Image: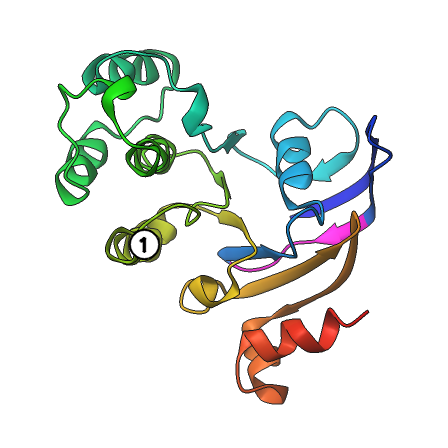
Amino acid sequence: MKIENILKNYDSGFELDIPCLELKGNVIGILGHIGSGKTSLLKTLSKLNNGSYTRSGNDYFYMVEFDKLPRSKVRLISNVFESIKPHFNRDRFNSLLDIFKIDSEDITSELSDGQKKILSFILTISIESEILLLDEPFSKIDPYNRKNMINTIIEVAKNYKHIIVASHEIGNLQRIIDYAVLIKDGKIINSSSIEIIEKDFPDIKEWYRENYKD
């Protein structure tokens, strides 16, 4: 998948400037410090309102923001998703509710922030679009459920052409990504397959530190 000519200016003065980026691999990590442009890139990809791209198949699907979930029962929210998303996998959704111990009769306003984040993840990962976007999925998640998230991504990755995961928590991506992209100040500063990275560095953290030097 190739992304070209993305240029977006924000009122804050921040600029997202990506002339060309070819994304390779099944699970792709967008890595960078907080404020580097990861979320801006994913939101731009989800809307594709400024730039061009080369791909085929279903649209991108951007991760549901946990603080924007409607106040309703989990079951009713999933029914809405199923009605508007033709590739909603109901069996996967129900299975993940069990794994993450969320009841379908739970009301979102009574869930903790961590549980809302998990529900957002479950809703997103239950959409079988060709390309899936996940923005900071591990933030605010306890170690036990973080491990479940990682295992879930590994398990379902084969069902997607690409899963793009943006995170500043590099260690959580070590097991799941096969291609890494570094973004800094709204610009791509490096990208490489994990296979090539591991030839020169002991792990992805060292590659990140080496390339992210000021």
Indicate the position of residue 130 as horizontal and vertical percent values: 47, 38
Q: Report if residue 21 lies within the magenta region.
A: yes
Q: Residue at x 33, y 39 (%)?
A: 114
Against 156, is 103 above or below? above
The magenta region covers: 20-25
Indicate the quadrant where residue 213 lies.
bottom right
- Total residue callouts: 1
Front residue of 2/62: it is: 62
Q: Is residue 119 left or right of residue 209?
A: left
Front residue of 34/100: it is: 34
Indicate the position of residue 100 as horizontal and vertical percent values: 19, 42
Q: Is residue 38 left or right of residue 71?
A: right
Indicate the quadrant where residue 23 lies.
bottom right
Front residue of 32/56: it is: 32
Q: Is residue 62 left or right of residue 146?
A: right
Q: Quadrant of the C terminus?
A: bottom right
Q: Residue at x 71, y 78 (%)?
A: 210
Indicate the position of residue 137 as horizontal and vertical percent values: 43, 45
Indicate the position of residue 190 as horizontal and vertical percent values: 74, 65
Q: Report if residue 208 lies within the magenta region.
A: no
Against 108, is 1 above or below? below
Q: Residue at x 14, y 39 (%)?
A: 101
Q: Determine the secondary structure under disc 1.
A: helix
Would you name the residue on which mark 1 appears? 146
Near mark 1 (Cα within 10 A), the count class, few <14, some 14-19 or many ≥20, is some
Q: Residue at x 32, y 49 (%)?
A: 156
Which colouring convention does the figure follow?
Answer: rainbow
Task: Inspect the image, locate mark 1, and give the three-letter code of the amino acid beneath it.
Answer: Arg
